[in-house]
Image (spheres, rainbow, N blue to C red):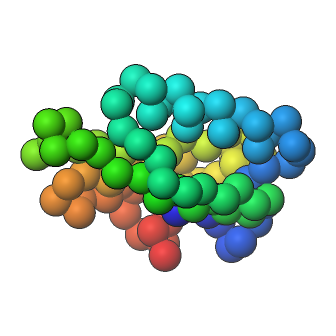
């Protein structure tokens, strides 16, 4: 799930929603993963995907980079690793 801080909108227009859908599609093609279901709302999105066993990785690093109205957010880019380590620390991961 990707959600705006304090439930604020992360998509300001239909074009924003179409852009994230296209970005997800590009990432799926590049990774070889499949998407079972997704929903995009103005303040968050859900993706339910899976990968094939031959593509399973033992490590990963996921980064969410703010765009649009989130550009001024104090948390900046947020990362998550396979060990559960997150950056930045503090209230950003509430």
Total labels: the figure holds 0
Q: Can you say whether 61 is above or below 42 in the image?
A: above
Q: Residue at x 79, y 59 (%)?
A: 42
Can residue 2 be spotted in the picture? no
Farthest-out residue, right: 13
79 vs 13, nearest the viewer: 13
Left or right: residue 66 compared with residue 33: right
7 vs 56, nearest the viewer: 56
Q: Residue at x 49, y 76 (%)?
A: 94
Residue 86 pos. (x, y %): 31, 58
Left or right: residue 26 compared with residue 57: right
Can residue 42 be spotted in the picture? yes
Left or right: residue 78 compared with residue 39: left
Q: Residue at x 40, y 23 (%)?
A: 30
94 vs 22, nearest the viewer: 22
Residue 2 pos. (x, y %): 56, 58
Q: Can you say whether 75 is above or below 3 in the image?
A: above
Which quadrant of the view contains residue 20? top right
Residue 84 pos. (x, y %): 23, 63
Q: Residue at x 34, y 51 (%)?
A: 50
Left or right: residue 62 compared with residue 20: left
Residue 55 pos. (x, y %): 19, 36
Q: Can you say whether 8 is above or below 40 in the image?
A: below
């Amino acid at each position: 799930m990707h959600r705006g801080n304090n439930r604020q909108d992360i998509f300001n227009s239909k074009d924003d929603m179409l852009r994230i859908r296209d970005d997800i599609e590009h990432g799926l093609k590049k990774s070889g993963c499949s998407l079972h279901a997704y929903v995009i709302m103005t303040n968050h999105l859900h993706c339910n995907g899976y990968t094939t066993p031959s593509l399973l990785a033992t490590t990963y690093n996921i980064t969410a980079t703010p765009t649009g109205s989130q550009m001024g957010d104090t948390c900046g880019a947020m990362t998550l690793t396979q060990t559960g380590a997150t950056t930045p620390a503090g209230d950003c991961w509430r």
